[in-house]
Image (tube, coloured by chain):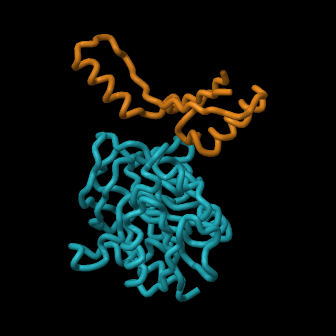
Amino acid sequence: MKARVTVMLKTGVLDVQGEAVRRALGTLGFEGVEAVRQGKVIELDLAATDRAAAEAEVKAMCEKLLANTVIEKYSVEIA
Amino acid sequence: MKAAVITFPGSNCDRDLAVAFERAGAEVVRVWHKDSALPQGVDVVGVPGGFSFGDYLRCGAIAAQSPIAAAVKAHADRGGYVIGICNGFQVLTEMQLLPGALMRNAGLKFICKPVVLEVATTASAFTEGYGAGQRLTVPVAHHDGNYTVDAETLARIRDEDRIAFRYGDNPNGSMADIAGVLSANRRVLGMMPHPERVVDAAHGGTDGAALFAGLVGKMALA
């Protein structure tokens, strides 16, 4: 079973890297990019076969390590 | 007075921190990250600067889950003193011993230079050796020192006088110019600048010496 975790900065947390990317896109001539938020995607291969249990376990991993919930939010997709 | 200095893979200020404690009169024990207990009788734990675990995932995130981290947490929960400098500050926020998080510098660049700090409170063992509002020159060397905290927590740490040091000229975008912050019991300090790099005239300055002297003096009296 595979899991995909997406970690993004929480709404309202200033993303200085995303803002730099937005400015660079403007410099390249891509107009109308109003905002860029940068995050990370983490893919996991899991031995688990039970979807609900896998999701619960990956959420626990996010809380403990994969995301810093002081500044980041996460979402989990199980496939 | 006994100080423990932790070493993680990628720590690079551990020896300097040990020397700063020794100069101030402490007995120093070096502790490896895989140890699951601190030596007996440790009064202060120093979490040094560097790039623990290569800054993988997030700065300090993996170190915060290492075996020794649980012992450091237990030490702090018992009312023990802890100082985290630079990467050590990042580790302590990741351990949630201190509020907030250290994000990428607002200017996106790694900053390595002396900065002016203002002593924002003298009400802690770390800062009582300074005068209120005293200005110090202490080097910073970091890419992720942009202190970020939610508005409610920021108001609380201000109300509780827990900002230890502020930048004179904010180099990294930190909220409220915060360079160092204290725990609620004032016994855990995290700061991005490196006081251990200014404890000898040969370093080019000695403004960090009073921090270690104050801390060691406090413990010696206890």
Q: Nearer the viewer, residue B34 or A72?
A: B34
Residue A29, placed above or below residue B45:
above
Q: Position of residue A76 (x, y in %)?
A: 63, 27
Whole-percent x, y for residue B114 in the image? 25, 61
Q: How many marks?
A: 0
Q: Residue at x 48, y 62 (%)?
A: B8
Residue drawn at (50%, 69%) of the image: B6
B77 w.r.t. A71: above or below: below
Question: As drawn, is B169 to the left or to the right of B218?
Answer: left
Q: Position of residue B169 (x, y in %)?
A: 27, 52
Q: Quadrant of residue A17?
A: top left
Q: What's the colour of chain A in the image?
A: orange
Furthest-front residue in this view: A47
Viewer-proximal residue among A33 and B15: B15
Residue at the spot 59% in from the left edge and 27% down from the top edge: A4
Colour of the chain lettered B: cyan
Quarter holding the N terminus of chain A is: top right
Q: Is residue B6 left or right of residue B18?
A: right
**Is any part of residue B185 visible from this angle?**
no
The reply to whether residue A78 is in sight is: yes
Is residue B55 toward the left or the right of residue A66 in the image? left
Q: Residue at x 36, y 73 (%)?
A: B16
Q: Nearer the viewer, residue B43 or B52?
A: B52
Q: Quadrant of the C terminus of chain A?
A: top right
Dividing the picture into quadrants, the one containing residue A22 is: top left
- Provide residue B116's location: percent of width, then percent of height: 27, 61
Above or below for A58 versus B22: above
In the rendered view, tell whether residue A66 sits above or below residue B192.
above
